[in-house]
Structure formats: C-alpha cells, structure tokens
Image (cartoon, rainbow, N blue to C red):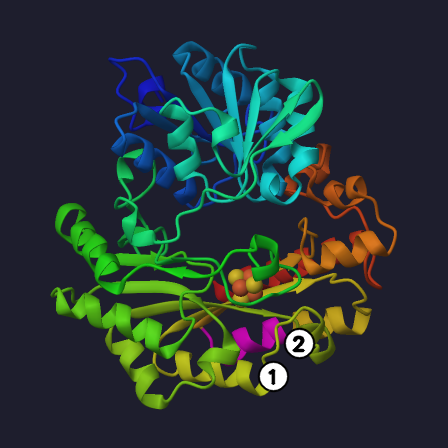
C-alpha cells in the first residue's frame, strides 16, 4: 500500500500540524499481522476531528489496522515532520508505542495519551521520556487539550497536561475533558481507514458510533470502570446521535451500526430515546449491535425485547465473565445466573444474537471454577445454536482497576503485572500476549491449554 493511502485525512499538499498514530500491538515487520478485525480508533479520530475543525492539518495512521512494521511507521512520521506527533497508549500496546517513540526524530514534539497513560501517569511519562526528549502527556480524553497545544498554548496553560522539567514531574491541575458531548463536532470518518467497512460475518456495510462516554459500573477487571476513569457518564443527545446515523445511511449506504459505547444498553429510557430518535428521522431497516449488561436486560419487559428486535437489534455483547457467583460478586458483575440465562433466552428466542464474554484465571479462582466457566460458555452455545457465541479471555490486570490494586497489595510488582501484557516469543508468539503470572489455582500454562481446547471446540462446533 502506498504511503498516502496509509495516512487518513491529511492534506499532503501542506505542512502537517499533527500526525496521530494508533499504536500497533506488535512489530509487524517481525511477523505479519494475523487476519483479525480491528476496531477503528474512535478516540484518535475525535481528536483529529476537533483539531481539524479548528483549522489544523491532521492525519491519522492506523498502524494496527494496516499491520505496519515499526521501521516503516517511524520513517513515514519522521518524513512528514509534523509540528506534533500523537500516540495512544493502551496497556497491551505500551511496548510498541515505546519502540515507536524511540525511533522518532529527536526534535519532534510527542504527545502521549490513552488509558494506560491516564492510569499510570508518572511511570508512563518517565518511560517515554527515557526514549524521546520532548514528551507531553495528556490525561483522560484529549481533544480539547490537543487542539489547545496546536493552537499554540503551552502545557502550563492546559489542565491535565503532564511533562518533566529537569527530571521533575510537572503538571497543570485538572482535566480538559468535554462535559457536553453535543458540543463536539460530528466525528469525521475521513480519519478512519476502516469505517465504514464491510462486516466479514454479515456482509453488511457497518459503521461504529459512540453515543456516550464512561460507564456507571465498577467492575474490578475493567479498564473502563467508573473508579478507573473517575469521570461521570456523559450521554450524547439522542437527536445528535440520530443525525450522525442518518448521515452515514444517506452518504455511505451504511446498513448496520455497531454502538461501541462501554455500555450502550444502560437503561430502558436511554435505549428507547435513541431508537425513537432514529425512527423520527426516518431511519428504518438498519441493523445494530451493542453492549449490554445481564442485570439490566433481565429486568426488561417482553415488550421491550420485542421493541429492540423490531428496531434492528442484531447482536448484543454481554460480559458474563464467570459462572461462579462468588467471582461475579468479587468483580462487581452482580447478575445472578437466572438473570444471565433470562437475558440470553429473551434475546435469542427473538433472533437477537448474543456474544458472551468470559474471563478465566481471575485472582483467587479455583480450578473447579475455571472449568465450570468454560462448561457454561459451551452449554450456552449448545443451548442456543447459531445465536450464542463466546469469547473467552485469560485474566490480565489493568492499571488502577480493583484487581490491579488487590494484586499490588498482595505483593505483585507493577513490572510483574505489566509482564502479563508482553508479547510471546518463538512458538509462543502465536498468541498476542501470554499469561506470565498465576493469580488463581490454574497455572498460566494450564489456562492457555484450556483456552486452546475451548477455542478448538467452538470452531468445530460452529462449523
Ligand atoms: S465491564 Fe462493562 S459494565 Fe463493567 S465497568 Fe466495564 S464497561 Fe462497565
């Protein structure tokens, strides 16, 4: 692919004000990217949209989607010589983001942000400052702060900006997050390489839409939990959401929307307001997928499930996590088994698919609990053939979550916990990341073996 096709949204005829990079999970120069779908970097695209609205020339390179090798990525950015380079740092992409920073021309100004930078602020700033000389870290949502930097403000004038001064941590107190999401410009998809795109399972043209930021819940395994982000939930006005979707349908022939909110079905009132607003602007025959929560769905009336189906609900993702009541309580997923089963039944019997997320290897998990969770994922697939699929993950701690804090108190070092997000080598590099620490009764090797067996079973079962 030519260089200009790899940079979304940038006007190549004038100097670049900023190049944003969606960090790759691995260096794809060493091993090509496997064929998996990458969610578009919505946060970076919102930053680019906001900056562009203020007259800045911004481009976005989705290095993960394109499967770019590090050397090419760094040389592209260095050649563009923008006023600022921005990169998002997630805990799983931290290592590659650091490698990228290391290869930047020394006088380029680097802005780092994202969930990992927000939760392990000082450590992350110091790590990046060791490999690159000019680094500013922006905590939390960054569109307002980044535009302010591009407008010429100094970090000292921007709440939520952190930097090192002669090795000493300096920062401007507060955050620069938008309180009213409706005041943000509508997301410009010219910055996204794969949105809209054709969904590989359904063949429909799909676009992703964010209707809210934040989650009211506090699951102890989740990097998006309320206490981790420390921000209130902010909803976009339903009419504003409907306008965005109407534009996607009219201009891009979009047939399906994936609501990528942390929790889209947060209440009956909220979901009704969005679907009603879509109806009011004449949107029909549109499918949608979203996230939901069993404890909320189980309280919905049969009429409401009918309404979801009649208004395009196609697949709902539920974080079921564990069959063990003890563990679900521990991680603050307080749906009962009855509520989980009721939600799955009510959805699937109407032809709405369910994607169930499960986690094994949670701290204190016994072997019996691990096996029971895997059995539960199997059982739900067998009970709802064609309408239930499971995604099982091995537990990995994310900074500032309840489980991370518990593990640190139990004696694990930050390095040990971060090693759970490191890449494997050789044969073991087939997996994106490897479990390295043991938090429950099963060893990392045992969990890996059980997960492979489950994945193989699911592949054979579904085909
Ligand atoms: S797992 Fe889901 S419901 Fe729980 S805190 Fe995270 S986003 Fe919210």
Closer to us: 460 or 338: 338
Instruction: Assign ligand 1 to one image quadrant.
Output: bottom right
Residue 24 in view: no
Residue 355 in view: yes
Q: Left of 219 or right of it: where is 49?
A: left
Query: In this rendering, is residue 267 above or below 403?
Result: below
Q: Quadrant of the N terminus?
A: top left
Q: Which quarter of the picture shows residue 245?
A: bottom left
Which residue is denoted by mark 2 in the rendering?
323
Q: Which quarter of the picture shows residue 265?
A: bottom left
Q: Position of residue 408 (x, y in %)?
A: 81, 52
Q: Position of residue 314 (x, y in %)?
A: 33, 68
Q: Left of 242 or right of it: where is 133?
A: right
Q: Position of residue 297 (x, y in %)?
A: 45, 80
CB within 8 Å, label 1 to label 2: yes
Residue at point 58%, 29% (across, down): 97
Neighbour class for label 2 at 10 Å: few (<14), some, many (≥20)?
A: many
Tag 1 secondary structure: helix
């Amino acid at each position: 692919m030519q260089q200009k096709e790899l940079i979304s949204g940038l006007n190549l005829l004038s100097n670049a004000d900023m190049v944003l990079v969606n960090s790759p999970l691995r260096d794809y120069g060493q091993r090509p990217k496997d064929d998996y779908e990458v969610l578009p970097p919505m946060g970076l695209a919102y930053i680019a949209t906001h900056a562009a609205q203020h007259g800045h020339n911004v481009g976005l390179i989705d290095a993960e989607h394109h499967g770019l090798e590090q050397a090419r990525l760094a040389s592209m950015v260095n050649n563009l010589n923008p006023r600022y380079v921005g990169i998002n740092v997630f805990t799983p992409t931290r290592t590659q983001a650091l490698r990228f920073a290391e290869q930047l021309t020394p006088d380029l100004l680097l802005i780092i942000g994202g969930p990992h930078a927000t939760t392990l602020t000082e450590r992350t700033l110091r790590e990046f400052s060791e490999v690159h000389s000019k680094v500013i870290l922006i905590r939390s949502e960054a569109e307002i702060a980044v535009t302010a930097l591009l407008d010429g403000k100094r970090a000292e004038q921007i709440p939520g900006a952190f930097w090192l001064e002669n090795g000493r941590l300096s920062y401007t107190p507060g955050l620069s997050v938008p309180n009213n999401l409706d005041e943000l410009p509508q997301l410009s998809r010219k910055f996204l390489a794969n949105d809209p795109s054709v969904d590989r399972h359904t063949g429909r043209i799909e676009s992703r839409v964010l209707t809210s930021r934040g989650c009211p819940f506090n699951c102890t395994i989740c990097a998006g939990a309320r206490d981790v982000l420390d921000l209130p939930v902010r909803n976009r006005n339903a009419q504003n959401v409907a306008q965005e979707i109407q534009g996607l349908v009219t201009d891009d022939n979009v047939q399906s929307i994936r609501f990528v909110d942390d929790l889209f079905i947060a209440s009956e009132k909220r979901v009704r307001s969005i679907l009603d607003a879509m109806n009011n602007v004449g949107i029909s025959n549109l499918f949608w997928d979203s996230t939901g929560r069993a404890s909320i769905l189980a309280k919905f009336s049969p009429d409401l499930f009918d309404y979801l189906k009649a208004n395009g609900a196609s697949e709902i993702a539920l974080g079921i996590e564990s069959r063990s009541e003890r563990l679900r309580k521990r991680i603050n997923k307080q749906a009962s088994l009855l509520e989980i089963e009721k939600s799955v039944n009510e959805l699937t019997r109407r032809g709405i698919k369910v994607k169930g997320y499960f986690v094994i290897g949670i701290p204190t998990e016994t072997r019996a609990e691990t096996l029971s969770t895997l059995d539960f994922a199997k059982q739900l697939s067998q009970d709802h053939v064609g309408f239930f699929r499971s995604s099982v993950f091995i537990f990995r701690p994310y900074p500032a979550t309840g489980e991370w804090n518990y593990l640190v108190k139990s004696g694990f070092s930050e390095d040990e916990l971060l090693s759970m997000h490191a890449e494997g080598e050789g044969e073991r590099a087939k997996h994106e990341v490897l479990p390295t620490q043991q938090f429950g009764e099963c060893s990392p090797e045992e969990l890996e073996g059980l997960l492979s067996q489950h994945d193989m079973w699911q592949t054979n079962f579904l085909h």
